[in-house]
């Protein structure tokens, strides 16, 4: 699978002080998003919306807003 890193520069590894979040574009017309695991409270807030084959992550709003 070929991946194209489209992470906004401000969020690139080492620039944001928030770990290494990333947004990667795939050849299958999808995105792969790397972020932080949800806290137990946040995970409870989305209870019932997450299928067994899904994970929920959290990223700073600026990372997605920077893709526009």
Image: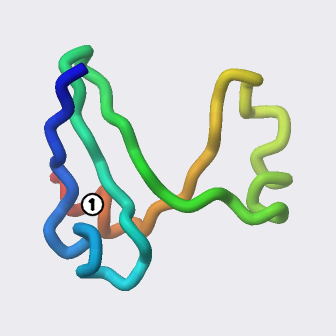
Residue 40 point in image, percent of width and height:
83, 61
Where, by quadrant of the figure, is residue 37 drawn? bottom right
How many marks the image carries: the answer is: 1
Other-residue count near label 1 (Cα within 10 Å), few / some / many at <14 / 14–19 / ≥20: few
Residue 54 point in image, percent of width and height:
64, 29
Q: Residue at x 83, y 64 (%)?
A: 41
Identify whether 15 is placed above or below 66.
Answer: below
Identify whether 26 is placed above or below 5.
Answer: above
Q: Secondary structure under badge 1?
A: helix
Q: Residue at x 16, y 49 (%)?
A: 6
Q: Is residue 61 left or right of residue 65?
A: right
Residue identifier under label 1: 65
Q: Quadrant where the N terminus lies?
A: top left
Q: Is residue 54 left or right of residue 47?
A: left
What kind of colouring is applied to the model shown? rainbow
Residue 57 point in image, percent of width and height:
57, 51
Q: Residue furthest bottom?
A: 17
Identify whether 3 is placed above or below 58.
Answer: above
Q: Residue at x 27, y 60 (%)?
A: 65
Residue 47 point in image, percent of width and height:
83, 42
Q: Residue at x 62, y 44 (%)?
A: 56
Pick whichever, 9 or 50, lies toward us.
9
Pick whichever, 48 or 56, lies toward us.
56
């Amino acid at each position: 699978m070929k991946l194209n890193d489209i992470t906004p520069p401000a969020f690139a590894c080492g620039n944001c002080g928030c770990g290494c979040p990333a947004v990667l574009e795939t050849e299958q017309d999808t995105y792969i998003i790397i972020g932080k695991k949800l806290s137990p409270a946040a995970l409870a807030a989305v209870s019932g919306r997450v299928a067994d084959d899904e994970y929920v992550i959290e990223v700073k709003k600026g990372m997605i807003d920077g893709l526009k």
